[in-house]
Amino acid sequence: MDTPMAVLEEGLAWLEEGEGADAVLEEAMAAMQKSSGSMKGAWKLVAAEAYLGKGKASEALSSASEALAIFKESGLKAAEVQAACSVASANLAKQDWEDAIAAVTRALDLTV
């Protein structure tokens, strides 16, 4: 996995294929320690999705928000869209409707 998008695809695939959220989170946390820049952002986003899988919305929101900031700074629009969607999902899990709508709106704005 040599690009942020490859990391995202692989990490999210683990979760979709039934890999335990704890195992994915452990892998993401270890990889984050060795990464920087947009690669670190990708692992933060994988961690956010794993946190959501564990029902830890606050941790997911924190990790997804950090990833969103990294991707915005890096100019990686596709990754920024994914991060905004994860921020929205975390806000939905927290029942913070207004922030969820704002995050989805941001994701949509990035796609046009």
Image (cartoon, rainbow, N blue to C red):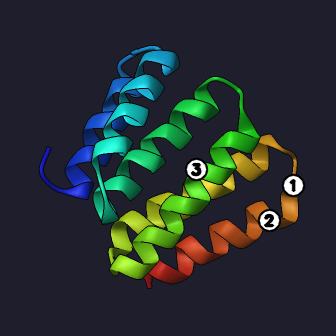
Residue drawn at x 17%, y 56% as measured from the top left: 3
* 62 on left or right of 94: left
Q: Say if 41 sits above or below 46 in the image.
A: below
The image quadrant that residue 102 belongs to is bottom right
User: Which amino acid, by three-letter code, is at mark 3?
Assistant: Ser
Judging depth in this view, the residue of 15 and 105 nearest the camera is 15
Label 3: element kind: helix
- Disc 1 to disc 2: CB gap under 8 Å: yes
Q: Residue furthest left?
A: 2
Numbered tag placed on residue 63 in the rendering: 3
For the N terminus, the quadrant is top left
CA distance separating discs 3 and 2: 16 Å
Give the class, few, some or many, for how many residues have Cα within 10 Å of label 2's Cα (few <14, many ≥20).
some
Mark closest to the chain's N terminus, 3 or 2: 3
User: Which amino acid, by three-letter code, is at mark 1?
Assistant: Asp
* 93 on left or right of 34: right
Residue drawn at x 46%, y 59% as measured from the top left: 82
Closer mark to the observer between disc 1 and disc 3: 3
Q: Which residue is mark 1?
A: 96
Q: Residue furthest front?
A: 33
Q: Which residue is mark 2?
A: 99
The image quadrant that residue 112 belongs to is bottom left
Numbered tag placed on residue 23 in the rendering: none
CA distance separating discs 1 and 2: 6 Å
Label 1: element kind: loop
Q: Say if 33 sits above or below 67 in the image.
A: above
The image quadrant that residue 48 belongs to is top right
